[in-house]
Each structure stands twice: as C-alpha cells, then as structure tokens.
Amino acid sequence: MSKDKRADELYTACDSRHTEAEMERLCSVATRNRFSYSGSARAGCYYCMEIWEPSGMKVANFTDCDEEASDEIGNATILCPFCGIDSVLTSIDADPITEELLTALNDYWF
C-alpha cells in the first residue's frame, strides 16, 4: 500500500478534518515553537502521546539554537518533557489537542 493511500485511510479513521497538507503543517509547527509553547493553554507530543498544560511544567530542554544568543532561544524547538523528542504541538498551533490528532500525526510522521 502506498504511503499516500495509507495516510488517507488514517486521516479518515482518526480525524477527517485534517488533510495531508494540514498534517504537514502541523508537523512543521512542532519546530521553532518556544514562543507558542509559553503562551499555550495545552501541549501534546505526537511521539509519546502525552497531553499537558505548559503553565504547570517548565521545559528545560530545547534544541535548534545557540543558548548564548537570546534572540535565537525564542525560536528554539521544545523537546517533550516526557520523552525528549521534538514532536510537541501547542494549542496555539493546533486546537484542540486531542489523542486522536496526536495518533494521526504519529501514524503520519513515524
């Protein structure tokens, strides 16, 4: 089965609101997301499927920046505080964050 046909079936089964283009967009906003994380009501990881409230959890680990350059830190990519993978979505970029959405993204990306 081709990746496109399998992906189409997953979108239909998991969340028919999201097209392949939307899945690509959602995966792309999981990078350079430190600003959106700090202002988000919820976050979720589409690798380990955890969903949490960012205000209650300090994220110490991020990537994609030089920690000495403060202008780059804001553009950093958050690493999931549960699994350490760079697959974190925020409710600013994807609302609502649901288990179904995370499952569809996990199936699509991984």
Image (cartoon, rainbow, N blue to C red):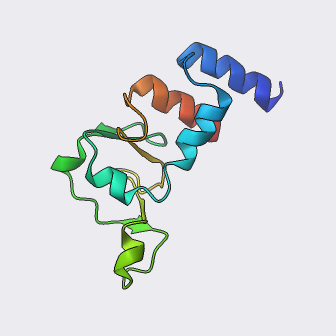
> The C terminus lies in which quarter of the figure?
top right
Q: Residue furthest bottom?
A: 68
Q: Residue at x 53, y 40 (%)?
A: 26
Q: How many marks?
A: 0
Q: Does residue 78 lie above or below 9 as drawn?
A: below
- Image coords of residue 89 (percent x, y): 42, 43
Q: Does residue 44 lie above or below 103 as drawn?
A: below
Q: Does residue 57 lie above or below 51 as drawn?
A: below
Q: Residue at x 28, y 39 (%)?
A: 42
- Image coords of residue 51 (percent x, y): 32, 37
Residue 96 left/right relative to 28: left
* Among the 4 quarters of the image, the one containing residue 33: bottom left
Q: Residue at x 47, y 27 (%)?
A: 101
> The N terminus lies in which quarter of the figure?
top right
Residue 88 left/right relative to 26: left
**Residue nearest the viewer, comparing 89 with 83:** 89
- Image coords of residue 61 (percent x, y): 35, 66
Q: Residue furthest right?
A: 2
Q: Does residue 62 lie above or below 46 as drawn?
A: below
Residue 81 left/right relative to 18: left
Q: Residue at x 47, y 39 (%)?
A: 46
Q: Residue furthest front?
A: 71
